[in-house]
Image (cartoon, grey):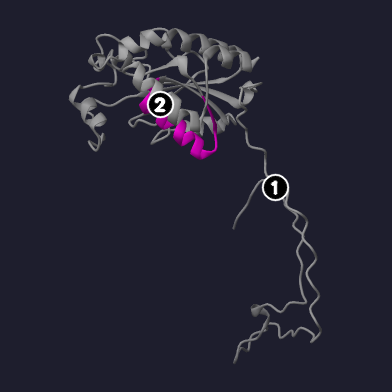
Amino acid sequence: MCATHSVYSVKTKVGPRLEPYMRPRSGDTSTRSSYRAPATPRPSPPASAPAPPPPQAASAPKSLGRLDPSRCALIIQDMQNDVVMEGGAFASSGAPAHCKQQNAIANAMRLADACRKRGVMVIHVWFVVEPGAPGVTLNAPLFEGLVESKAMVRGTWGAAPVAGLEAKPGDHVVEKMRMSAWEGSRLETVLKSGRREIVIVTGAWTNMSIEHTARTGADKGYLMIVPEDCCSTMNADWHRASINYALQNVSAVSKADDVIAALG
């Protein structure tokens, strides 16, 4: 009662082992086989062929070296007006000023353009909630602040991407409602669709969404690359703390120009 699109041939081995189903049960009058294995020593099973080696995982060299664009994806995360622009919901945090200090928008634009030309998958990850923030759990101060500030609401200026980092034809857009780009989103489905195992992470905020995404990606087995001049947070101290400790241990920290050079 089943079907498929192919016919498979599988080698099997029978006897001399006597399987339980070969034995007639007590009182069984059916035509079940009463075969008995001969009382001869069982030969040792043939040595199995060695298992094929596992596929080679991408390794992170001390310097980026050469990156294969067909294996890479660029994430531009949370670069939205409420997050990094004056007049946004979180402007009082200092995020707009630090974004300018880092020149993060221009650097990310330049990197994104270079990635598109070389065939790197470009993915925009946006934090978007519906009016009233239904479904957002208030289990952390960040999410409480999000709801209180009425930030990142679909259709508003605040949720829109910053000028210059809008999605272009051929780019992918992934929405989320958590700090990590992986949590509750279709990010991994998109990456697997393109067989991308090297993930370049840019955006805001360095010590929150960027760090969460890099940590989880490393745990999942992806090679994570963070060009730190394409990232920003509330101030330089928090940025340096994340770059110099956590991100050094879960990703290859680099610069936009180094990534572009490595992509060839």
Res 242 label: 2
From what the image shows, is residue 100 above or below residue 217? above
Amino acid type, callout 2: Ser
Left or right: where 175 falls relative to 35: left
| Whether residue 181 is visible | no
Res 6 label: 1
Secondary structure at badge 2 equals: helix
Report x, y in % for residue 245.
44, 29
Magenta stretch, residue numbers: 204-225
Left or right: where 236 falls relative to 140: right
Q: Is residue 210 magenta?
A: yes
Crowd class of label 1 (few under 14; some 14 to 19; many from 20; radius 10 Å)? few
Task: Answer with the quarter of the image where residue 181 lies.
Answer: top left
Secondary structure at badge 1 equals: loop
Crowd class of label 2 (few under 14; some 14 to 19; many from 20; radius 10 Å)? some
Q: Is residue 116 magenta?
A: no
Marks 1 and 2, Cα distance to the nearest angstrom?
A: 52 Å
Left or right: where 134 falls relative to 164: left
Say which of 74 and 260 sits in front. 260
- Which quarter shows the C terminus? top right
Amino acid type, callout 1: Ser
Report x, y in % for residue 157.
28, 12
Say which of 49 and 154 sits in front. 49
